Amino acid sequence: MSNRHEEFVCPKRTPPELIEKLKQTVAVEEITEEEADPIYLRITRYNFYHSWSEKPDTLQIFRVLQDHKSKIYYDDAAQIGITDIVAIFETELGLVESNCPLLQTHLLIWRGIDACECYAGSEELTAYLMYLDT
């Protein structure tokens, strides 16, 4: 692997750093659990906690506001019928989920997931995702 790839992958971001990266990328507002889609929240909570012995339930939920910076995410989400994009963070366990596939991909990369492992055999896609992060 090239040094560029290692620089891109190795930095693991903590939940506060990841939230800050999200805020630098798009405008967001923190919302309560009552304001979030209850079905998506229930599914996400299950995904976060079903395999962990500890269940701290320290969720932070952010709604992505619609503006010129978030247009790419809303265009992506519209393809699957999503009109309200959220990102849910489990701050104690360091987990994150978004109902927008493109934003979810970016969150995984920003968190420090190895993009080449996620997209094995797709150097072109990996290069594109790395470009988006710059």
Image (cartoon, rainbow, N blue to C red):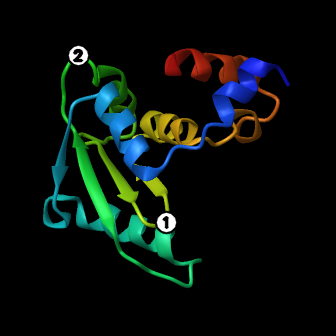
- Which residue occupies the extreme right position in the image? 1
Left or right of 67? Residue 79 is right
Q: Which residue is mark 2?
A: 68
Q: Is residue 132 visible?
A: yes
In the figure, residue 63 lies in which quadrant? top left
Q: What mark, if any, has residue 93 been given in the picture?
A: 1
Say what secondary structure mark 2 lies in. loop
33 lies above or below 4: below
x then y, percent, for residue 104:
47, 42
Say what secondary structure mark 1 lies in. loop
* Residue drawn at 52 percent across, 43 percent down: 13
What whole-number distance in Å separates the C-alpha atoms at marks 1 and 2? 32 Å
Q: How many marks?
A: 2
4 lies above or below 13: above
In the figure, residue 55 lies in which quadrant? bottom left
x then y, percent, for residue 30:
18, 49
Query: Disc 1 vs disc 2: Cβ atoms closer than 8 Å?
Result: no
* Residue drawn at 68 percent across, 37 percent down: 10
Q: Earlier in the sequence, mark 1 or mark 2?
A: 2
Q: Is residue 99 visible?
A: no
Three-letter amino acid code at the position of disc 2: His
Three-letter amino acid code at the position of disc 1: Leu
